[in-house]
Amino acid sequence: MTAPPRPERAHPGAPARGGKRTPQGVHTGAPECNAVIMSRSQAAPDGVDSTLTDRLLAGLPADAVVTDPDITASYAHDMASFCPSGSPAVVVLPRTVEEVQHVMRTATELRVPVVPQGARTGLSGAANASDGCIVLSLTRMNRILEINPVDRIAVVEPGVVNADLSRAVTEHGLYYPPDPSSWEMCTIGGNIGTASGGLCCVKYGVTAEYVLGLDVVLADGRLLSTGRRTAKGVAGYDLTRLFVGSEGSLGIVVRAVLALKPKPPQQLVLAAEFPSAAAACDAVCRIMAGGHVPSLLELMDRTTVKAVNDLAHMGLPETTEALLLAAFDTPDPAADLAAVGALCEAAGATEVVPADDAAESEMLLQARRLSLPALEAVRGTTMIDDVCVPRSRLGDLLDGIEQIAEKHRLTIGVCAHAGDGNTHPTVCFDAQDPDESRRARASFDEIMALGLRLGGTITGEHGVGVLKKEWLARELGPVGLEVQRAVKQTFDPLGILNPGKLF
Ligand SMILES: Cc1cc2nc3c(=O)[nH]c(=O)nc-3n(C[C@H](O)[C@H](O)[C@H](O)COP(=O)(O)OP(=O)(O)OC[C@H]3O[C@@H](n4cnc5c(N)ncnc54)[C@H](O)[C@@H]3O)c2cc1C
């Protein structure tokens, strides 16, 4: 994967209206966002409230306010299927905190909803526009403000692309672990909005563990600073953590202080083939119970392996029912892999193949990262679930998913952050076929119900957005829901921040 071009462009990962998805899951055809700009003297196009644009332009440069309907429509939605989206009145692309404050003051005054957006790679509709809203795209606020090896922190603006930060800190001998598979596209603001995870979480944890402090523009335009840049700190309620995963519903993140780790040694990967998903899940349990700390532990089922081969001709073994990838970034990864390989064999692995070197390891990881785009190519559309269960129940979940697929006569491929118990059962279907679409939605819901029955959660990392809001209520229960609504009310009494999401 290559780094996307940087400032002054519509984000290359941005879904475009009428645009086409590439096999990598990226919509193409996004128009240049600053090709059409407003000036104070221009009349707003039909349907756009000129009071709103005039007020916005009073505190923003002309090229930061976009009203061309062809362009604003390209900011309507993220990458989730089955999520309704509306037509934004205007897209605003601020460069400074003061500009974001101006947008929020204007929105409060005029009671206009605001939908914050990063790169729109989200998979739950959490960044989807509502009718008449201001889309607040943070992609131009993409500066890395500080990398401090002594304090082991980075201070960044929200539009910094995850992979750009990862590469920048590497030059200082440091490591920013959260690594969603979309890391070449997604932004730190979006990662904070969804509390995103990735391949490394089994050892290093999710985004929440790396956010030390935030600057957040509140609904009325005030600037709130939360948290710290110190190694420790327990002053007051942990508002920083509250914002992580809040899906843009409590405030606009304009700056983040992120914890960094020393750069670990290069990881080595092992691939193990299993005659059944149950045997692979057994191996996961043995590895974790054995006290091992792999830097990743990923599972791809037969359907996923085949889809990746079909898409990218990776030469993965298609006779296997499940492929487990384990990696270690320890000083002696070969020894750790040997121990884990033995556990895989004890669980019934038919083949255990350690990668020879870093290049072969990276090839295996690349195959894993291609899982979701590859499954999308199977029937044209996917619904990607994100159920996370205690890892001891992973085998039951995979077994249940197979039964659900059979019952609904659908292809459901599963790739999983197996070491976390976090699965992505991906329902492949033809969106042009109403009956197949109905069965896809039903199976998607049944998988979440199964996850809850097994003591899990409806979302391990992708968030609730529009896609799962009914399910959030089920998971939280009435008291949990009431308290969460009260939190929302405190931060956003007018209900203008990303309305229609979460609840
Ligand atoms: C191919 C592919 C692979 C993926 N793999 C993973 C994975 O491994 N792990 C994972 O967790 N996710 C994964 N995702 C999902 C997605 O990439 C993540 O959810 C990511 O964090 C979204 O970042 P974004 O910049 O695209 O944010 P967006 O989708 O634009 O926004 C996400 C949410 O954050 C809010 N938001 C964005 N910026 C701000 C801000 N500055 N202030 C307040 N709120 C804000 C939005 O309102 C929205 O609610 C994948 C997606 C794709 C397409």
Image: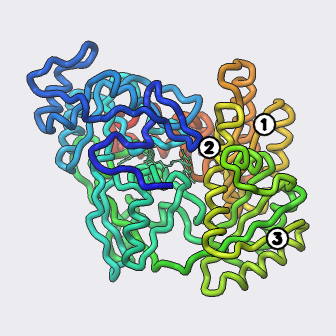
Vertical comparison of 297 with 496: above or below: below
Vertical comparison of 193 with 123: above or below: below
Residue pointed to by mark 3: 352
Residue 39, by quadrant, is top left
Residue reaching furthest to the top: 46
Q: Position of residue 98 (x, y in %)?
A: 17, 48
Q: Position of residue 243 (x, y in %)?
A: 40, 53
- Three-letter code, disc 2: Pro
Residue pointed to by mark 1: 411
For disc 3, the neighbor class at 10 Å (few under 14, some 14 to 19, many from 20) is: many
Q: Position of residue 462 (x, y in %)?
A: 56, 47
Q: Could you tell me how many numbered marks the image carries? A: 3
> Residue 423 or 454: which is nearer the viewer?
423
**Residue 332 left/right relative to 347:** left
- Sequence-wise, the earlier of marks 3 and 1 is 3
For disc 1, the neighbor class at 10 Å (few under 14, some 14 to 19, many from 20) is: many
Contact check, label 2 and label 3, Cβ < 8 Å = no
Residue reaching furthest to the left: 41
Residue pointed to by mark 2: 373
Q: Is mark 2 within 8 Å of ligand 1?
A: yes
**Residue 350 left/right relative to 264:** right
Q: How far separated are the C-alphas under marks 3 and 1?
A: 27 Å
**Residue 38 left/right relative to 417:** left
Contact check, label 1 and label 2, Cβ < 8 Å = no
- What residue appears at the point 62 percent right and 58 percent down from the top-left corner? 366
- In front of the other: label 1 or label 2? 2
Residue 428, by quadrant, is top right
> Residue 275 or 226: which is nearer the viewer?
275
Residue 489, by quadrant, is top left
- In front of the other: label 3 or label 1? 3
Give SS at disc 3: strand
Q: How far separated are the C-alphas under marks 2 and 3?
A: 26 Å
